Image (cartoon, helix red, strand yellow):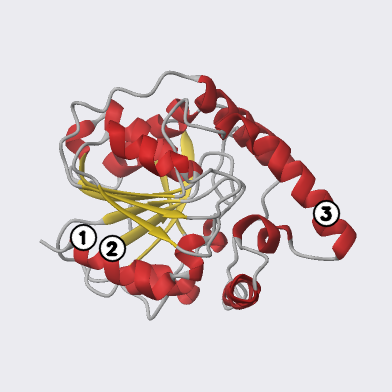
Amino acid sequence: MSQQGTTQGYADAPTRTIAASDAVFAYRELGPQTGVPLVLLTHLGANLDGWDPRVVDGLARDRRVIAVDYRGVGDSTGRVRTSIEEMAGDVVAVIEALGHDRVDVFGLSMGGMVAQAVAARAPRLIDRLILAGAGPAGGPGLTTMTAVMVRTVLRAGLTVNDPRALLFFTPTTEGKHAARTYLARLKERTTGRDKPVAPGVYQAQLAAVRQWGTQEPADLTAFTGPVFIVHGDSDRMVPPANATALARRLPGAAVTVYPDSGHGVVFQYHREFVAGARDFLHR
């Protein structure tokens, strides 16, 4: 059963669970019980603790926000999925199990790919869609994500850096500062942290993204809701050309590309992003 309640902030939000699609999914929710809830779908290799508290708290100021762990990730049970479409099926099941028949969705990176697959599978379930650092199926450069990650993780090990600092941020002074402050914010939650992400999760999700990168674009013509696309101008994991490719698939989408920013654009520009997202989601 879904439990309701509010918390002071994402760093203190309790982890809840709900049964759906023959598994038990972990999630956290906060914010007022008014309006259309916003479902958060996170990036590759992340659990619930991968969300920047400033982003979630900002979005939850005037709406219910629900962050969900994928199957087999963190405290969610089951075997991790190896395709974007399977992940989308789980997300639909979780939303329905929570009792919602209409939601907004914010998909980050791989989560933006899953969000597109949800929109294709159940277009009437999503009202408004935010896609950050994402690309359409068959998008430019998506099949090279594995190579980019492997090279960067090896370099991080040699230079004693957190791989996320190199993968998500630019090597400029501003980028390095944004990386340090982001990684510090991720440590604000000190109790009730999610189960660490296992190596097998990375392998399965990289395979899913690689497959997505070779597919024909999803048919999104049945989804007619507003779309907000956000990208960093120096994203090495999902090249910025994907923002343009997405916009072509989603006519009328609003597009914002932030300067001197990489894959972690919503973390680096969290104030600007939250302001823009809240304005976009306002009814």
The one nearer the camera, 131 or 32, is 131
The residues tagged by marks 3 and 1 sit, at their Cα atoms, a distance apart of 38 Å
The reply to whether dot 2 and dot 1 touch (C-beta < 8 Å) is yes
Q: Secondary structure at mark 1?
A: helix
Residue positioned 36% across, 67% down in the render: 273
Where residue 236 appears, as percent x and y from the top left, is: 60, 48
* Residue that label 1 marks: 280
Residue positioned 49% across, 49% down in the render: 69
Residue positioned 53% across, 43% down in the render: 239
Crowd rating for badge 1 (residues with CA inside 10 Å; few <14, some 14–19, many 20+):
some
Q: Secondary structure at mark 3?
A: helix
Q: Earlier in the sequence, mark 3 or mark 1?
A: 3
The one nearer the camera, 236 or 65, is 236
* Labels 2, 3: front one: 3
Tell me, yes or no, if residue 93 can be seen here.
Answer: no
Amino acid tagged 3:
Arg
Q: Residue furthest left?
A: 283
Numbered circle sitting on residue 277: 2
Q: Earlier in the sequence, mark 2 or mark 3?
A: 3
* Residue that label 3 marks: 155
Q: Secondary structure at mark 2?
A: helix
Where residue 78 appears, as percent x and y from the top left, is: 57, 35
Amino acid tagged 2:
Ala
**122 with respect to 10 (left or right):** left
Crowd rating for badge 3 (residues with CA inside 10 Å; few <14, some 14–19, many 20+):
some
Residue positioned 44% across, 27% down in the render: 137
